[in-house]
Amino acid sequence: MPVARLEIPVEDAETAVAAALHADRLEVCRDLAQHGLTPSPEAVARVRDRVAVLPNPPELAVLFQETSPSAAGSKAGNRAFHGDDSRLATLERLVGGFAEAGATSVVIGFLDAHGGIDREACRSAVAIIGDAGLQTAFHRAFDFALDSAAALRQLSELGIHRTLSAGVRGFEVGTVSLERRLVALKASASAGRATDPPVEVVPCGGVRCDHASRYLDAAGHLHASCLIDVNVSGVRRFSAAEAAGLRDRITDWTAREATG
């Protein structure tokens, strides 16, 4: 039976507690408004301490992204995704603290100048992360790849076991219809399952309850911030109702898959 997972990014311990009631995995970061940046090990530990007392605490992933990619738009080769020696040194300095703070995986996104997977930098990062006893995942930088199937094969060869994807090249999800995104996600998820070892494709980029089931049909997982606008200023806050609704969609989808 398919096992669908709900991943929710969080940037503070209070939100983590609310999200942990519904999520299978929390992606701990800071500055979600800028697509997320690397948190401190201390911030990860605060999340761990708050969720550890819950009956079924979720896994903790940690985002490693030193520079905001928001200014990159849909441009490949932006330095935000470069895996240079300085960033690898920073990763090596932090990863032991992430492990001690209870993380099970670190999420990276190193690309070359053409927007492809930077295999050399990723190979080094996987080794650094693995030496700390953690797994490696890939973030939405994956969506810059010209050939998603080839990129998934590369991730598999590198030992990276999952990647986020919005099903659209770059970060500009508003320029592509949901239907086209779902087609791309379904193709990527199929290609990921065909690699050895397989790579999970986790849909992201505006996932909401009203179309969550379609993302599940495409790839079998969900990544959602569950942030909603709370006033005309555009300020967004975590919605426990949205998170609960996504969990309900997963429960319904899993039951349907089991009988169908």
Image: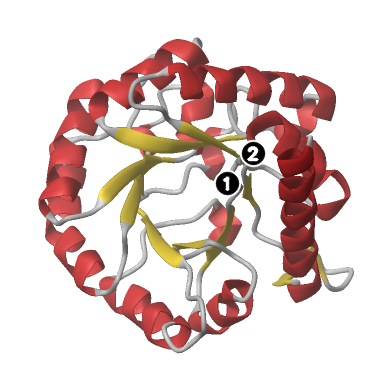
Question: Is 220 rendered above or below residue 119?
Answer: below
Q: Are circles 2 and 1 on residues that touch, CB within 8 Å? A: yes
In the rendered image of this protein, does residue 153 appear above or below residue 99? above
- Residue 63 versus residue 178 in the image, above or below: below
Q: Under tag 1, what secondary structure?
A: loop
Q: Position of residue 52 (x, y in %)?
A: 41, 83
- Left or right, 81 with respect to 147, comes to left
- Could you tell which of marks 2 and 1 lies nearer the N-terminus? 1
Side of 133 where 47 appears, left or right: right
Residue at x 58%, y 46% (from the top left corner): 3
Residue 47's x, y, as percent?
A: 42, 79
Which quarter shows the C terminus?
top right
Position of 184 with respect to 230 (left or right) is: left
Image point 82% across, 29% down: which residue? 178
Q: Position of residue 183 (x, y in %)?
A: 73, 19
Q: Which residue is mark 2?
A: 220
Q: Position of residue 222 (x, y in %)?
A: 64, 47
Q: Residue at x 54, y 26 (%)?
A: 143
Asked where in the image residue 202 lies, by quadrant, the reply is top right
Residue under pointer 1: 3
Mark toward the viewer: 2 or 1? 1
Task: Name the residue rendered at 78%, 20% in the picture.
Answer: 180
Helix or strand or loop: what does disc 2 sit on?
A: loop
Q: Quadrant of the N terminus?
A: top right
Q: Is residue 212 visible to the viewer in this orientation of the structure?
A: yes
Colouring method of the image = secondary structure
Which of these two is toward me, 108 or 246? 246
Characterize the local packing of mark 1: few (<14), some (14-19) or many (20 or more) Cα atoms within 10 angstroms: few
Kind of residue at badge 1: Val
**Marker disc for residue 22:** none
Q: At label 2, which amino acid type do we have?
A: Gly
Q: Residues within 10 Å of mark 2 (few under 14, many from 20)?
A: many
